Image (tube, grey):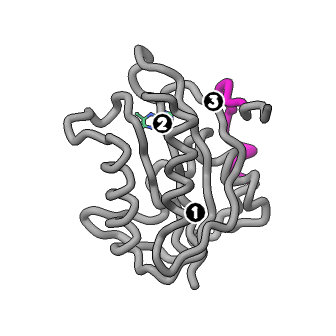
């Protein structure tokens, strides 16, 4: 089994519902188990500001799926939840699933780079990840706690559970 952290993000079509649906789908992946998910967080859009705030979270799964098979599955979930190909790179989206970390592996393929390139700088990835993995050290040897200390929160806040 491999421990894999997945970043979830949405800012269209009821973002919290999108994340809940995605977690449901992740929990149903073959040869996998959903172990944990962070709180949901409201975050300011990175990129153009003329789009709604995002809801972000990070989930931990244990899986026997190989990285590219897992990528195929996460892309399928994105498409099932109305992700459109025409969405521009920095524009709003119904669902983003990013494979952030796959065990301690470093992977560089044309369609898959792990650790995810945004991981070290993005508050909406670092803080939810830190919530569920306080002792984590990245494959490059850097401590997650150090990266979090260096990263401004930018107004990021956990959504209150009702
Ligand atoms: N901004 C935030 N806050 N959260 C995201 O998940 C997110 N995803 C994106 C871009 C457009 C870069 N901005 C984001 O893809």
Residue 5 numbered tag: 1
- Between discs 1 and 3, the one toward the N terminus: 1
- Seen from the viewer's position, the closer of residues 125 and 18 is 18
Residue 10 numbered tag: 2
The reply to whether residue 21 is visible in this rendering is yes
- Please provide percent x and percent y for residue 2: 56, 80
Residue 42 numbered tag: 3
Q: Given contact means CB atoms under 8 Å apart, are the residues at marks 2 and 3 in contact?
A: no
At x 78% / y 31%, what residue is drawn?
160
Choose mark 1 or mark 2, whichever is in front. 2
At x 50% / y 83%, what residue is drawn?
64
The answer to whether 20 is drawn above or below residue 74 in the figure is above
At x 34% / y 73%, what residue is drawn?
68
Residue 82 drawn in magenta: no
- Please provide percent x and percent y for residue 73: 37, 65
Residue 156 drawn in magenta: yes
The answer to whether 92 is drawn above or below residue 145 in the figure is above
Residue density around tag 1, few if under 14, some if 14–19, many if 20 or more, within 10 Å: many
- Seen from the viewer's position, the closer of residues 78 and 107 is 78
Q: Is residue 20 left or right of residue 80?
A: right
Work out which quarter of the rendered image holds the N terminus and state it: bottom right
């Amino acid at each position: 089994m491999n421990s894999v952290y997945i970043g979830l993000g949405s800012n269209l079509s009821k973002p919290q519902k999108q994340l809940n649906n995605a977690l449901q789908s992740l929990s149903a992946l073959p040869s996998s188990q959903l172990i944990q998910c962070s709180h949901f967080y409201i975050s300011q859009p990175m990129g153009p500001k003329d789009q709604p705030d995002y809801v972000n979270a990070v989930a931990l799964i244990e899986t026997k799926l190989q990285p590219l098979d897992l990528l195929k599955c996460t892309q399928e979930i994105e498409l099932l939840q109305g992700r459109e190909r025409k969405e521009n790179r920095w524009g709003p989206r119904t669902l983003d699933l990013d494979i952030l970390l796959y065990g301690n592996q470093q992977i560089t393929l044309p369609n898959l780079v792990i650790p995810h390139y945004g991981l070290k700088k993005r508050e909406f990835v670092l803080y939810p990840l830190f919530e569920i993995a306080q002792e984590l050290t990245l494959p490059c040897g850097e401590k997650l706690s150090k990266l979090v200390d260096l990263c401004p929160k930018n107004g990021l806040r956990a959504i209150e559970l009702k």
